[in-house]
Image (cartoon, helix red, strand yellow):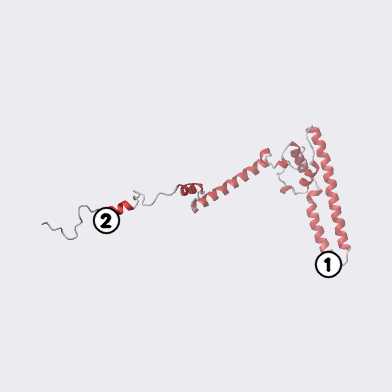
Amino acid sequence: MFRRRDGAAPADTVSEPEYTSLDQPARQAGKGRPTPKRSEVERRRREPYTPPSADRKTAAAQRRERQTADRRRRMEAMRKGEEWALRPVDRGPVKALARDYVDSRRVIVSEYILFVVFLIIIALFFLGRAEHGGSSSYLVLLIELAIVALIAAESLYHGARVTRLVKQRLPGQSTRGITWYVCKRAIKIRSSRIPPPRVSRGQEI
């Protein structure tokens, strides 16, 4: 009697969108993307944080400024003789007394030995051009031996004096290696000695 309209779905038929809603997983609300796996989250946590390039440049500049300030502060403390700023080889009252002794000497031949060697090399260069033969090589060997003997004799002399001062003023302190320490200090030019001299030439110590 009543005809069904063409194209109308029967009452007991479920529309197509309802079928698709049952087959597909529920859509995540708000995110618009699936929830990451636990392993992925843990991996991201373990990765180090990389700041932007501008932050890295700023951090590097600040680090350089801190290093410069630390070096300046350490050098200033070293000039004052503060123990924390010195190298381990320079620490202790014995080494301080040895440095003061060397720095207070008016004349130390070993300090100027490099200038002497430079002049000798120049002289031998012109002498070798003027003469031919093995006499120049033999002369160079003799000069080298003389320089080594001079440095050794002066170091032994000053090392013995420093040892005697240590026994008088710092009884019980070890003087092991003090001669070699005096030698290394003496052969350097006064302006290049580290730690810098804190006494003047000729000053009583």
Q: Is residue 1 left or right of residue 166?
A: left
Quadrant of the snapshot with the N terminus: bottom left
Q: Position of residue 203 (x, y in %)?
A: 76, 39
Residue at the spot of label 1? 129
Q: Position of residue 199 (x, y in %)?
A: 73, 41
- Viewer-side residue, 193 vs 43: 43
Residue shown at the point (84%, 52%) measured from the top left: 147
Kindly state the secondary structure of the residue where label 1 is placed.
helix
Q: Position of residue 105 (x, y in %)?
A: 79, 43
Residue at the spot of label 2? 16
Kindly state the secondary structure of the residue where label 2 is placed.
helix
Residue shown at the point (86%, 57%) measured from the top left: 141
Q: Which amino acid type is shown beneath numbered disc 2?
A: Glu
Q: Taking 171 as reference, is 113 above or below it?
A: below
- Viewer-side residue, 138 vs 127: 138
Q: Which amino acid type is shown beneath numbered disc 1?
A: Arg
The mark that comes first in sequence, 2 or 1, is 2
